[in-house]
Each structure stands twice: as structure tokens, then as C-alpha cells.
Image (spheres, coloured by chain):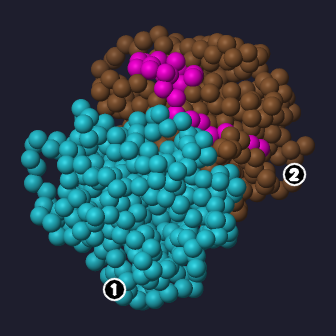
Chain colours: A cyan, B brown
Amino acid sequence: MRKNIKKFKNKPIIKAVSTVAGEKEKKGPLKDFFDITREDTKFSMPTWEQAESEMQRIAFELLLKKSKINKTDIDLVFAGDLINQCTSSTFGLIDSNIPFLGLYGACSTYAEGLILSALAIDSEFSDRAIAITSSHFCSAERQYRFPIEYGNQRTPTSQYTVTGAAGAIVEKNDMKNNVYINEATVGIITDMGIKDSNNMGAAMAPAAADTIRRYFKTSGLSPSDFDLIVTGDLGFEGHDILLSLLKRENIDCGDNFIDCGKIIYEKQADIHAGGSGCACSALVFNTYILNLFNVNSIKDILFIGTGALLSPSSYLQKKPIPSIAHLLRITKNI
Amino acid sequence: MRKNIKKFKNKPIIKAVSTVAGEKEKKGPLKDFFDITREDTKFSMPTWEQAESEMQRIAFELLLKKSKINKTDIDLVFAGDLINQCTSSTFGLIDSNIPFLGLYGACSTYAEGLILSALAIDSEFSDRAIAITSSHFCSAERQYRFPIEYGNQRTPTSQYTVTGAAGAIVEKNDMKNNVYINEATVGIITDMGIKDSNNMGAAMAPAAADTIRRYFKTSGLSPSDFDLIVTGDLGFEGHDILLSLLKRENIDCGDNFIDCGKIIYEKQADIHAGGSGCACSALVFNTYILNLFNVNSIKDILFIGTGALLSPSSYLQKKPIPSIAHLLRITKNI
């Protein structure tokens, strides 16, 4: 029978994190947490795609600097993004000189990278791995929707792609008072027939519900066993749908259910249904969530990265939006 | 210090493989090996992208059928392809109902999927995982170059994207006389400044040389210790460059160096520098190479999947072609 939960016996810890964010993110409630923010969201580069790569490069260099770990002591890097052929990652890390495994998990990429980093450490492939990702409002808009210059009006259920990059160094447990990756449940592709690419929260909510349901069913635990149940980027629309879906299955949803897409901008103008993009859950996890661990407000949570696996072509060919959600149980070693 | 080689202690075996191929591949030397070939390369679907997904769906179903393994006994599937946002995989596996981790490794995807499947088994996350991939000449041409209808003339160094899908079930060693994944070396992104997207062999050859060099240096082995050293899809041009690069470093290259891109079509008309695409190395490995193990012609090889991590946008923005090569040592358990 299938193993729905992987328990990481080596308790891989989150050794260091880094965050780079844009102008709009700096206006949000997490402004004081980011390592680096820039008002120039082109990051001095000639194109939006190169700006996104530059953010990922900066986030990568910051990881090494903050952790004081040498490049040659990192065994693997798992990276991915939303841009065609994941070039934000490949160009961002082109000079990294570290064994590289490319991922495509849309906005669930950070969760996927953290799971695979933990797996590599658990299998003793790596002593130390990096999970890193990025997204950029302007590169995503012109790829998925319209060029920025067109001034397209966004619908109320649409989400705002976060401009930023974030990464983590995951390593073997050093037995200190640390935050570690305890368990994981890998998502199953879910398709409930949603075709509106301006309502990705609705497409992703059933994937999150499926993964959460499988985790609770297999573990025998319930939401009240956790301080927080943090979804990736369902946003205001999708998070409401998730809670409805879970309630229908008699899973008790208290106010410990929160969503990164609701947190990152709060209710700024033009944000509509909240934040999205690979950097959304990565930035919120690396700042707001890890800070709650640091100040001892929380000690055991579920973090569920959600992703909408559509493409502009699949949308034009009138296909539904396949979605996925990967779950990590993150626990503080006390 | 970094671990350049992962030795899989659980010796994960390749339990079953499946292959689906198109019309041109059927005219090549491997024609009698493929499970399924179709003259209708649209596979009865309305678009090329949907045809590619359909091939991957068929390859997935075939894996279950040939192995007589139930879906619920498969813990994970690793899948990816060349199409934007990897939709050939997500739509091909939309009804698979198996925990899914999406990859982007361009033409190295099959090697990447096999490494991660072996890793999942070695860490005891999975008893059984699937690695699967696909590519399609027509979906790749219209995404990377020109619509087929345009009748663009291809340059002599250009390679021909293979139409096909291929997968493998990897599982715990059952201690029988089986072919298993012995070791792996993960590739590092390499950029030698090649910008010609019609000469991907030249871009990928340095990545293959780097991975092969690191493997031999770390293991203390040499090419003569192996029956074959099989690269993914360097083609006629890239394979020659690889041999030159290795000879320059005093690595002795005998006639045990072969390349899937040279094998799949041999010298058919219009093929130019050979085959490429995710399905190229996957089809050749699953047919020609595994057959050599079956008839006891070989017992220990290196298989190096190569990938060019460019995108049409990075090409238009005049960026070089970052490349990668992942190595697996495949050994027969005697």
C-alpha cells in the first residue's frame, strides 16, 4: 500500500533562509522581515525575465553569506519557477557551480524543493541542500496574461503575482533547538474542471483539501493538533473554498487555518484576491512563519504549498487547470 | 566536502519500462523494440500538445499493465517534459491519482526522474516510484522554432525532436537477477557561451564532459571499467565535441562511448545532427540499452542524460544556452 506520509528520520533542519522582494511587497505587512527589497523591480536588468533571475541569484548568494557556508559544502540545489523552461532558475544559478535538479511545481515549487531537500538528506545523498524559487509580477503577467503596457483590468478573483525570490539551506539535524522538516505528504494532481485562469484559488483549493484530508486520515491527527495550518497561495477566494470543502468532510477548521496569499499584501489596492506566484508562500514561510517559531509562538505546523499547473496554451486550448498541493509538517525541536 | 557520487544502498531495480513512439521513430533501427507506435502522430487528438500528453498517458497505463502493479502500490511519480509549464506531463497524468512531483530538466528529465526515484526508494519514502517523460517533434518545433506549416529549413547542426514517451517503474531490489541503479552524479549547470539554439549538441557537450570527469575523478574508475558510456542526445555534432573535450583531459575514449541521439534514427533523411528531446534518451535506454542487459551483452554502464536549459525568450534575449548532464551507473545484479 502507498505511503501517504514520509517521516524524515534524520530531522533535516532549516539552517538558513534568504528573502528578496519588490516594491509592492515592501508596502505590505512583512516589510520589516525581508533581507533585501528594491524599488526598482527591474533589479538593474534590461528585461523582466532577467530581473527575476537576478533576484534568484541574490537570494542564493545571501544564503551562503548568512549561513557562512561554503559553496563546495552544498551537495544539491533544487530550483524552479513559473517562467517557460524555468529559465529564472537556470540563469539565476548559472554561475552557482552546485549540482542542480530543476523542478516544475508552479507556486508549490518551494514546498516541493523543501521536501526533496529533506529526502536527499534523509537518504544520506546530501549533508546540505538548497531549495530556492522566484516569481515576478511583470514576467508572469506578460507570459500568462497580457503585457504590462496593455493596462489590462484584472478580475476580482484574480491574484497578484508576488515579485521576489526566497531560498533555504536544509541540513542534517545538529541536535540544537531548531526548526526541522518532520513529515511530508506529496500532492496528487486534482482537476475539478475549473477553467478560469483568473480564479486559480478555486482551481487549487480542491488539491489542498485532498492533501490535507490524506494527511489527517493517515496520521490520525486533526487540525487542533497544530498551531497553524498554512496554505500556499489560495488567496481570499480559494481559502474560503478550502474551508468549505474541509467542513463538508467534517474536518474542523478553526482560526489556525491561514493562507500566505492573504497575508503577504493584506488588503492593498489592486491586489484583488491576494498574492500568488512561487515567491508568495516562499517569502511568507521564510519571514512571518519562521519568525513565529523563533519567538516561540508556534512549535508544530502544517505548511501546504499549492500550485496551478496550467499554461497559456492549455488555457487557449480550453483545458481545465490541473492543480497540486504538497504538505510539510514543520516542527520545532525543543 | 560535497558528495559527487551517490551510491544507492538499496539497489533500486528497474522493474518495468514502457515505450510509445511516432512514425519517424518507427522507421529507425529500434522499430521492433517499441511497445506502441502510431503513424498518426496526433494520436487522435486535436492538437500536438494534447497528442504529447496522450502518449504520456498511454506510456503510464502501459507501465501498470506490463508490470501488473496496482496504481495504489505506487508511491510517487516524477515527470516532466519540454513544453511550457510541463503540461504534457500534467495533462498526461491528470487522471493518474498518484502523488506527483514535477521536474524540469529539458532532455535530461528521464535521467533526473530515475535518480530521484532511486533516491525516494533509498530513503524509504517509496517502495515503488515511476519516472516518465515525453517529447513531440511538432509541439517542440512550434514552441522553440517555427510552426510546422511554415516549412522552415533546418540547419546541418540542428537535431530532430523525438516523438515519443517512455517511463520506468523503479522499486526496491528483489534480489533477483536484475538491472539496478547503482550510483548517480547530479549535473552542474554549464555555460560555455554557445548561443546557437540550432546547435544544442555543442551547448550540452561541456556539461556531459564535466559530469563524466567528476564521476571518474571521484570514483577512481575509468572508461574501460564500463561496457558502455551512453550519453543522452548530443547527436553527431555534440558527441564528437564531447570526445574531444574528454581526450583533452586525458580521459581515454574508446568505442564504448555511444550517444542516444546518434542511435535512434541513424542516418535517416532530414535528421541532420541526430535525435533530441526528452523521449530520445528515454526511448533508447528503455529499448536498445536494456535489451543489451537482457541478452547479457553488457553488465555495467554509465548513462548520462543531457539537457539544454534554454527557452525561446532567453534565445531572443541573446542569452547563452545553460546545459546540464545527470549521470547514472546502471549495473546488472548477477
Depth-wise, is mark 2 or mark 1 nearer the camera? 1
Residue occupying the point 23% across, 41% down = A42
Location of residue A130 with respect to B45 vertically, above or below: below
Quarter of the image where one finds residue A157:
bottom left
> SS of the residue at dot 2?
loop
Kindly identify which residue carries mark 2.
Answer: B176
- Name the chain under label 2: B
Q: Confirm whether the magenta stretch covers residue B185.
A: yes
- State how many labels appear: 2
Labels 2 and 1 within one chain: no
Residue occupying the point 29% across, 60% down = A276
Kindly identify which residue carries mark 1.
Answer: A255
> SS of the residue at dot 1?
loop
Location of residue B193 with respect to B334 vertically, above or below: above
Q: Position of residue B66 (x, y in %)?
A: 69, 51
Q: Confirm whether the magenta stretch covers residue A157.
A: no
| Residue A315 is at least partly visible in this image | no
Residue occupying the point 67% across, 44% down = B1
Q: Position of residue B286 (x, y in %)?
A: 68, 37
Q: Amino acid at mark 1?
A: Asp
**In front: A331, or B334?**
A331
Is A145 displayed left or right of B162 in the figure?
left
Query: What's drawn in magenta, residue-wise?
Result: B182-206
Q: Position of residue B102 (x, y in %)?
A: 49, 51
